[in-house]
C-alpha cells in the first residue's frame, strides 16, 4: 500500500545575515487593498475612453467614413451636425465642466493637506496611524475635528459627502507616502552622520552604494512592507534626494552656480578627489547634516496637481457615491457613465440619471463582448491549423474578457437594484413582495463577481475611465488551460539586436532556447523618436529667439504653439507604441513559459544600468528597450494566469555576457558563429577554454538561469 505524503514546496535558501526578501508589487494593485490570496494580484484594470453622449461610437462594420464636409472653417450648423460622428470625442462644453470639477477636487485635496500639515503636533500621529492602518485612510482622517465633514460648514458648501470621502482617501495616501519619506530621511541622516566612510562614498561615488541602501532599510523597518513601491528603490530615491541637497549646499557656499544636475555631481566629486579641498568640503557637509538633524530636512508641504479621481472610498453602490452606470438600451454595447457635480456647478438633467441637474454625462463603448467573439473565432481557426497553444491562449483571453463583461453587468445591475430597493422602502404604499424580490436580487448580486471602484482621468483633452476587475480564479484558469505542472526555471536576457532571449533547462543539461525578434513597431518607434529629437531642437531655437526679443512673460506666438502641439502628439504616439511593444514581448514570453512549464523566471536587473563610454548610440538604443515596462507587463500577465507574484526574480547582470555558461571562464565576443577573433560588441560568443560557440544573448540567458544557484543577496524586492 502506497502511503500518501503531503510535501511542502521548497523555499529558496537565504543567508543568515541577509534581510528578508519581499515580493515585487505591481503598480496595478490598489494601495489599501488586501492582495489576492493566490497570486498577489488584486485587480486587472481595463481602460475605456469616455465620449460625449451625442457622439456615435459603434461605427465598425457600418461603412462609416469621415465626412469630407468637415473643415475648420465649416459653418456652425454643419460643425454641430458632424460633431456626433467625427471630430473630438468630448465636446468643449463637457471638457470645460469636467475641468472645473477636477479643479474643485484638487483644491479640496490641497485644502485637506494644508490643514493637516498646519497641525504639526498631529502630523506625526496621523502618519504612524495611516502607515499601520489596514483599512481605508479616510476613516482615520474624518475623525479629526478640523477635517470632519459635519463640523466644517465651509467644506459642506463646496462638495457633497461622498466626494469628500474620496478627497480624504486621496489625501491620506499622500500623507502616508510623505510621512514615510520623512522618517526614512531622518534615518538616512543619522546613518551617514555615524559613519563617515559611508558619507564619503555617497558623495564621491557615481552610484549610491548598495550597502548604504541595505543599512538604511535595516534601520527603518517600514520600507520592507511599503505597498506602493519596492522598499529598495524608495530608500534609493531618499538617498539621492539627500545627496542632491548636500551637493547644492556645497556649491552654494563656494559661490558657484548650480547648473545642471550632472554638472553638480562632477564638480563635487572633483572637490572630494582633491586632498586640499576634501577636508573643507567635508566640514561643510557635516555642518549641514548637523543642521538637518536639529531642524529637520527642509521638506515642502505636498500638493496634488494631477487631474484624476479615485472612487475607492465610494463602495456603497448608491447614487450618493458620485458616479453611476447605466446601460443604453437603444445602442448595443454602449454604457452611460454619470458623474455627480458639486454645488453650485450645474450639468445636464437626464431622465436616467439619479443626480438630476447635477449630472455630467458621458458614454463609452463596451468592447469586451466584441473581443470575446473575435478571439473565439481566431481560436477555432488556430485549432484547425494545428496551433494548439495559440488556441489555448486565445480561449483564455476570451474567457477573461467574458468574465470582465459579466462583472461590469453585475455591477450595473447591483447599482440599479440597490437604488430601486431604497426607493421602494421609502414609499408609503410599498409592495412587500416587490421589496422582498429586490432584497433577494441585491443579496444575490453582492455574492457575485463585481468590478471595483473606478478611476477617472483627464489627460490632454482625453477622458479615460479605468475599471478594475477581479482576476480569473484558479478554477476558471484550469477549465480553459487544463491542469498544469510547473517544475522548471527559465532565464531571460534583454538585448539590443533581440529584445529578449529565453532559455529553459529540460534535464540532462539540455536547453531549449527562444529568441523573440523585434517587430515593425520598433522601427516605427525609432523613426518617431528621431522626429522628436529634431523637432525639440527647432522648438528650443524658436523659443529662445522669441524670448530674447519679447521676454518670457509675453504670450507665445501661434506658430510656436503649433510646433509644441505637434511634438506632444508625436510623444503620445510613442507612448502608445511603448505599451503595445511591451505587451507583445511580454505575451510571447509568458506563453513560452506556459508551454514549457516554467515556474520561476529569472531576468536581469537593469533598473540602474548605464552603458560604459565608447559604445556610440548604445544609450539611445537602450532607452528603447523598455526594461521596466516589459518587466511589469510580464509580472502582470503571469499573475493573471495564477502564478504567485508572477514567479519572477531579478538577478545582477554582472558578468552574464562575459563568462561561458559551460565552463564559467571569461570568453570573447566574435563577429560570426565560426569566428575565433575577438570583435568588440560582436553578436556571438566564443570561449577559448572549452571551445563553446554560441549566440551571445543565448549564453547570457543561460548564465542568468544558472545564477539562482549562487548565494542570494538581499536587495530590492524579489532580487537575488
Image (cartoon, rainbow, N blue to C red):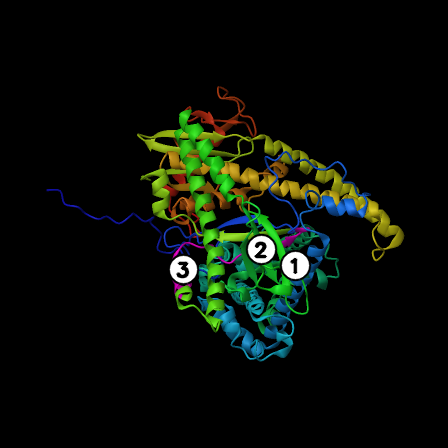
Q: Residues within 10 Å of mark 1 (few under 14, many from 20)?
A: many
The magenta region covers 436-462
Disc 2 vs disc 3: Cβ atoms closer than 8 Å?
no
Numbered disc 2: secondary structure = strand
Viewer-closest of 377 and 562: 377
The percent coordinates of residue 210 (x first, y second) are: 50, 53
Is 390 on the left or on the right of 344, as rendered? left
Residue farthest top in this picture: 674
Disc on the earlier residue, 2 or 1: 1
Is the N terminus in the top left, top right, bottom left or bottom right quadrant? top left
- Res. 15 in view: yes
Is 574 on the left or on the right of 382, as rendered? right
Q: Residue at x 52, y 69 (%)?
A: 138
Q: Residues within 10 Å of mark 3 (few under 14, many from 20)?
A: some
What number is the disc on residue 247?
1
Q: Residue at x 47, y 52 (%)?
A: 409
Q: Is residue 429 magenta?
A: no
What number is the disc on residue 441?
3
Viewer-closest of 87 and 652: 87
C-alpha gap between disc 3 and disc 1: 64 Å
Residue farthest left in this picture: 1
Q: Nearer the viewer, mark 2 or mark 3?
A: 3
Disc 3 vs disc 1: Cβ atoms closer than 8 Å?
no
Question: Taking 22 as reference, is 603 above or below it?
Answer: above
Numbered disc 1: secondary structure = helix
Viewer-closest of 628 and 329: 329
- The residue that disc 2 covers is 337
Amino acid at each position: 500500500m502506497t502511503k500518501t505524503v503531503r510535501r511542502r514546496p521548497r523555499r529558496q535558501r537565504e543567508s543568515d545575515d541577509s534581510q528578508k526578501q519581499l515580493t515585487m508589487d505591481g503598480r496595478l494593485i490598489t494601495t489599501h487593498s488586501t492582495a489576492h490570496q493566490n497570486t498577489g494580484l488584486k485587480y486587472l484594470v481595463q481602460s475605456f475612453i469616455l465620449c460625449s453622449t451625442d457622439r456615435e461610437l459603434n461605427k465598425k462594420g457600418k461603412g462609416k467614413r469621415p465626412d469630407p464636409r468637415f473643415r475648420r472653417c465649416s459653418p456652425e450648423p454643419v460643425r454641430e451636425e458632424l460633431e456626433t460622428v467625427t471630430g473630438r470625442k468630448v465636446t468643449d462644453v463637457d471638457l470645460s465642466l469636467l475641468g472645473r470639477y477636477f479643479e474643485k477636487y484638487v483644491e479640496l485635496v490641497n485644502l485637506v493637506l494644508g490643514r493637516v500639515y498646519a497641525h504639526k503636533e498631529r502630523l506625526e500621529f496621523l502618519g504612524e496611524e495611516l502607515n499601520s492602518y489596514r483599512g481605508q485612510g479616510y476613516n482615520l482622517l474624518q475623525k479629526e475635528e478640523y477635517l470632519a465633514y459635519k463640523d466644517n460648514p465651509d467644506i459642506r458648501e463646496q462638495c457633497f459627502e461622498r466626494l469628500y470621502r474620496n478627497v480624504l482617501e486621496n489625501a491620506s495616501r499622500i500623507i502616508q507616502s510623505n510621512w514615510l519619506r520623512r522618517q526614512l530621511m531622518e534615518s538616512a541622516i543619522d546613518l551617514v552622520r555615524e559613519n563617515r566612510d559611508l558619507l564619503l562614498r555617497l558623495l564621491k561615488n557615481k552610484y549610491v552604494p548598495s550597502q548604504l541602501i541595505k543599512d538604511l532599510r535595516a534601520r527603518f523597518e517600514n520600507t520592507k512592507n511599503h505597498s506602493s513601491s519596492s522598499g529598495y528603490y524608495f530608500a534609493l530615491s531618499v538617498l539621492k534626494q539627500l545627496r542632491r541637497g548636500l551637493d547644492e549646499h556645497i556649491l552654494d557656499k563656494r559661490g558657484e552656480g548650480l547648473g545642471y544636475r550632472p554638472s553638480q555631481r562632477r564638480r563635487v566629486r572633483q572637490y572630494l578627489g582633491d586632498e586640499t579641498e576634501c577636508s573643507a568640503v567635508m566640514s561643510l557637509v557635516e555642518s549641514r547634516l548637523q543642521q538637518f538633524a536639529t531642524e529637520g530636512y527642509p521638506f515642502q508641504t505636498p500638493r496634488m496637481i494631477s487631474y484624476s479621481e479615485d472612487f475607492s472610498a465610494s463602495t456603497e453602490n448608491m447614487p450618493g457615491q458620485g458616479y453611476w452606470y447605466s446601460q443604453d438600451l437603444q445602442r448595443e454595447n454602449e454604457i452611460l457613465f454619470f458623474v455627480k457635480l458639486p454645488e453650485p456647478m450645474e450639468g445636464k438633467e437626464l431622465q436616467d440619471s439619479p443626480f438630476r441637474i447635477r449630472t455630467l454625462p458621458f458614454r463609452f463603448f463596451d468592447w469586451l463582448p466584441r473581443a470575446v467573439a473575435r478571439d473565439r473565432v481566431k481560436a477555432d481557426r488556430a485549432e484547425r491549423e494545428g496551433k494548439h497553444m495559440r488556441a489555448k491562449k486565445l480561449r483564455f483571453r476570451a474567457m477573461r474578457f467574458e468574465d470582465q463583461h459579466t462583472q461590469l453587468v453585475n455591477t450595473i445591475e447591483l447599482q440599479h437594484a440597490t437604488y430601486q430597493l431604497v426607493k421602494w422602502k421609502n414609499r408609503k404604499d410599498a409592495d412587500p413582495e416587490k421589496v422582498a424580490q429586490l432584497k433577494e436580487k441585491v443579496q444575490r448580486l453582492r455574492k457575485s463577481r463585481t468590478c471595483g471602484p473606478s478611476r477617472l482621468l483627464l489627460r490632454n483633452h482625453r477622458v479615460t475611465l479605468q475599471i478594475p476587475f477581479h482576476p480569473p480564479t484558479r478554477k476558471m484558469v484550469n477549465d480553459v488551460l487544463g491542469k498544469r505542472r510547473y517544475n522548471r526555471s527559465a532565464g531571460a536576457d534583454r538585448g539590443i539586436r533581440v529584445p529578449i532571449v529565453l532559455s529553459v533547462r529540460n534535464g540532462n543539461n539540455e536547453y531549449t532556447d527562444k529568441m523573440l525578434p523585434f517587430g515593425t513597431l520598433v522601427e516605427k518607434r525609432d523613426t518617431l523618436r528621431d522626429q522628436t529629437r529634431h523637432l525639440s531642437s527647432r522648438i528650443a531655437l524658436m523659443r529662445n529667439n522669441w524670448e530674447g526679443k519679447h521676454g518670457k512673460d509675453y504670450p507665445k506666438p501661434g506658430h510656436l504653439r503649433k510646433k509644441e502641439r505637434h511634438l506632444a502628439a508625436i510623444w503620445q504616439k510613442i507612448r502608445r507604441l511603448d505599451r503595445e511593444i511591451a505587451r507583445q514581448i511580454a505575451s510571447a514570453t509568458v506563453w513560452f513559459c506556459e508551454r514549457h512549464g516554467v515556474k520561476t523566471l529569472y531576468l536581469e536587473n537593469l533598473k540602474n544600468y548605464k552603458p560604459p563610454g565608447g559604445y556610440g548610440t548604445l544609450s539611445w538604443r537602450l532607452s528603447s528597450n523598455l526594461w521596466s515596462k516589459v518587466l511589469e507587463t510580464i509580472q502582470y500577465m503571469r499573475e493573471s494566469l495564477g502564478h504567485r507574484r508572477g514567479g519572477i526574480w531579478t538577478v545582477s547582470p554582472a558578468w552574464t555576457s562575459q563568462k561561458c555558461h559551460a565552463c564559467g571562464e571569461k570568453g570573447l565576443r566574435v563577429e560570426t558563429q565560426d569566428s575565433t577573433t575577438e570583435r568588440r560588441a560582436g553578436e556571438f560568443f566564443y570561449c577559448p577554454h572549452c571551445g563553446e560557440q554560441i549566440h551571445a544573448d543565448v549564453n547570457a540567458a543561460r548564465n542568468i538561469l544558472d545564477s539562482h544557484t549562487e548565494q542570494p543577496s538581499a536587495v530590492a524586492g524579489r532580487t537575488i
